[in-house]
Amino acid sequence: MKAQRVSTTADYRQLLRMIGADRAGLTFLPQEEAVYYLSTPEFSSGDLVMVRFKELPPGEKRYLYCSKSVPVSVMANINRQLRAPR
């Protein structure tokens, strides 16, 4: 496929709007984000199609940044919550 590649700082909602307006043909999103947006009234019309690639690992790494002024006790609580089974 010889698609024109465009870099943007748009968020996922804006990217999906661009596809809906035929300003873009496709985008890549984490599955969790795609499921969320496709369940909202704005994108639930069926005009968008989600394609899953089986060979990709699940989820997306996410990072939480805190300043050094955050107390150690708060950081310990955040870390404990992040490690908790879901």
Image: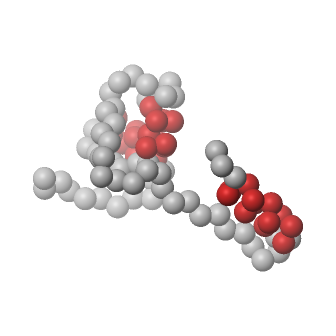
Pick the front one: 80 or 35: 80
Residue placed at 50% from the left, 24% from the top? 41
As rendered, which of 55 and 5 lies closer to the eye? 55
Q: Nearer the viewer, residue 74 or 47?
A: 74
Query: At 34% from the left edge and 36% from the top edge, which residue is drawn?
Result: 50
Above or below: residue 8 compared with residue 26: below
Count of marks overlaid on the render: 0
Q: Is residue 14 visible?
A: no
Color scheme of the displayed model:
secondary structure
Residue lying furthest left in this view?
A: 1
Quarter of the image that includes the C terminus: top right
Residue furthest toward the front? Answer: 85
Is 35 positioned to the left or the right of 6 in the image?
A: right
55 to the left or right of 35: left
- Counting from the top left corner in percent of width and height, residue 21 is at 33, 36
**Which sits in the foreground, 58 or 34?**
58
Tell me where residue 47 sits by quadrant: top left
For the point 40% across and 40% down, the residue is: 16
Please tell me whether residue 85 is drawn above or below residue 66 in the rendered image.
above
Write down the quadrant of residue 38 in the picture: top left
- Residue 63 seen in this snapshot: yes
Query: Where in the figure is residue 73, as x and y percent of width and height?
Result: 86, 67
Residue sitting at x 48%, y 55%: 60
Q: Is residue 12 left or right of residue 56?
A: right
Residue sitting at the far bottom: 68
Percent position (x, y) of residue 57?
A: 39, 54
